[in-house]
Image (spheres, grey):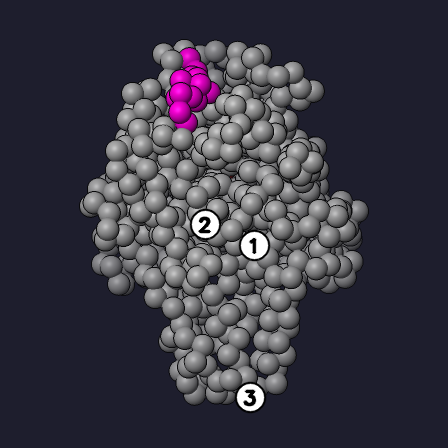
Amino acid sequence: MSDSALLPHRIAGLHDLATDLWWVWHREAREVFRQLDYKVWRLTAHNPVRMLRLVSPERLAEAAADPGFLALYDEALRQLEAARSGDQTWWRQRTTIGRKRPIAYFSAEFAIHQSLPIYAGGLGVLAGDHCKEASDLGLPFVGVGFMYPQGYFHQSVTADGWQEENYERIDWEDAATQRARAADGSELVIAVPLGNRTVLVSVWLVKLGGISLYLMDTNLPENAPWDRELSARLYGGDRETRVQQEIILGIGGVRVLRALGYDPAVWHLNEGHAAFVVLQRIRELLELGYSFADAHAEVRRSTVFTTHTPVPAGHDAFPFHMVETHLAGCWGGLGDHREDFLALGRYDNGSGTLFNMTALAMRSAAGVNAVSQLHGEVTREMWAPLIHELPPQDEPVKAVTNGVHLTNWLSLELNRTLDKYLPADWRARHDDPSVWDAVLDIPDEVLWETREKMRGYMYHFVRERIRERWVHENVPPARVLAGGTLLGQQALTIGFARRMTAYKRPDLIFHDPDRLARLLNDPKRPVQVVFAGKAHPADEGGKHALQGIYRRALDPRFGGRIAFVEDYDLHVAHYLVQGCDVWLNNPRKPLEASGTSGMKAAANGVLNMSIGDGWWPEGFVGGNGWLIDPAVEHADNAAQDAADADALYRLLENEVVPAFYERDAREVPLRWVQMVKQSIRTVAPRFCTRRMLKEYVERMYLPAFEASLTNK
Ligand SMILES: *Cc1c(COP(=O)(O)O)cnc(C)c1O
């Protein structure tokens, strides 16, 4: 980690600014680092901690005497202090509840910045955006998760399109993390009983403005080699590893908070991975003399649970013997209640009775929510047998539709345009739909120019990325071609970037290759498709889909108009969701619970073309994108794929391509620009984390606060 002692006194606060990841979503703070040394900023892939070790002392001295730089610097530090204090935030206005007893938010992954690779996809991005917004709104909030020292894998692809997974160790010198410390100042280490041994867990603190994130790590020399590996990688191991990770997340996570002196009023389990929190909290209450039933009821009142997928594999379930083996050391405090506890997870999902983490969480949370309206319906149906046995409630499963952290996902270019035409305080009020009406008044040619610049940045980014690999990694020419060398800067660009997995049908657009080739190769109206996404290391189907796309990218009949961008992450995502013209989403309905990449795209004026799944039935209002509507539902997957693909081609042929290439005398596609305006105006205020988190507060957190605070 950088050392503030080496910085000129006047700008010694740079250390603080670099080591609090609050800078990630604040333009003023980013501007400080950009201006400090733009070359080094680029060289370090936007890592200020590393930057401060590389910037020359001369440049630092110069900056410390530059009034322009100092004004930026002072303003960024002032804002950081304000964020930390939590004063003058929405939470302060909304409630008299203080900040002493926070909301504890548990998640297996958090996507804060690409320099901290502890996320795999949508779930992590949502958790990261949730935390950023919690800081902005001034919520009393603390996050708990894992520090995976080897993170999630970096993807590379062989010349034949087969995904390879490379794990790199996080370089602690360059990471914006520090060891969490106990009250006496020593580095915090906690013990978690696992099987018949004890595993030690160290704790990292990641500062995020108004909130803190604590990340657990088992890589301590005192642990056995296999235990040191437990937190090495995200989703890297087998079932045995997974259940042990989840025991550490749940039981260890509660212990971490206790050791740090936290007494949370609300416990939010983001997905079932964290459901063992319930076990540890019940144990605490049993030790205070509660009966099992009372302890469970008490825990339930203050627990909130969000379920994120209807895909069965997304709901962890373990054989009972496996759970019992690894929890062996935990039963002590549970006395005779082992069977009672195991019953909380018992669930027959149709292929046998297992200990199901979602069932445990649903039975143990008074507030349960799904992540879109449609997902709410699907969840109520999917878990109907379990919901029937719960205490009656108005809304056993609520729907709180996801959102994205808007100011973090909007492009710099679009920000500049919005600054000119929206009310001056638009950022502070961005979840107010009326703020966005002014988008309609942006002159068409101005907005189109903005959009063209955004496509240009994406185009250059994709090509430079593969050029780098060609020059420095000596990748074979085929990979350079597949990486996007033949893309055009002006062509209508369709983006598809998300996890490569069967239900998302990444290869649907290739259903009729000839029809697609005709579309792409139209000499006057060319179309190109940019793909990106990792397949889970164990997902053979996902890897085959990726390989299929890769081979198409290399097939001359598609004219070099298919590209696959390797190693999708937050950084790549920013360019793609900002720079494409159309964002394609074609999951097998109803398996996409929400999806968030389409929200990021739509708010940037990238038009969604999507199946009516997840958030899109709420987002699509006509004229702000397209609904891929096959008008029929087939029980048979192959028949559904054919119908969906046909609907997709018809939209492209009859509506999308004509609207994009129909230009006025100034070369502006007027019809298209109208849709861009409607996309931004209708999606930005509604599908942002500001709206989402306020909804969590009103519908999930405040009821739990009430139950929790009145009961003590
Ligand atoms: C937004 C995002 C996702 C989620 O994409 P979906 O379309 O919702 O599946 C996954 N990965 C990254 C890096 C993202 O930024």
- The residue positioned farthest toward the front in the image shown: 289
Crowdedness near tag 1: few (<14), some (14–19) or many (≥20) residues, C-alpha within 10 Å: many
- Which x, y percent locates residue 245? 34, 37
Q: Which residue is mark 2?
A: 259
Say whether mark 3 is within 8 Å of ligand 1. Answer: no
Q: Work out which quarter of the rendered image holds the C terminus and state it.
A: top right
Element on which disc 2 rests: helix
Label 2: few (<14), some (14–19) or many (≥20) C-alpha neighbours in 10 Å: some
Label 2, label 1: how many angstroms apart (C-alpha)?
A: 17 Å
At mark 1, the secondary structure is strand
Report x, y in % for residue 65. Answer: 55, 88
Q: Cβ of disc 2 within 8 Å of ligand 1?
A: no
Q: Position of residue 668 (x, y in %)?
A: 66, 52
In the displayed structure, 10 sits above or below 554; it is below
- Residue 205 appears in which quarter of the rendering? bottom left
Badge 1 is on which residue?
211
Q: Please tell me whether residue 344 belongs to the stretch shown in magenta.
A: yes
Residue located at (60% from left, 66% from top): 80
The residue that appears at 34% across and 48% down in the rendered structure is 201
- Residue 65: mark: 3
Callout 3 environment at 10 Å: few (<14), some (14 to 19), or many (20+)? few
Q: Earlier in the sequence, mark 2 or mark 1?
A: 1
Q: Which residues are magenta?
A: 334-348
As for residue 611 lying within the magenta part, the answer is no
Secondary structure at badge 3 equals loop
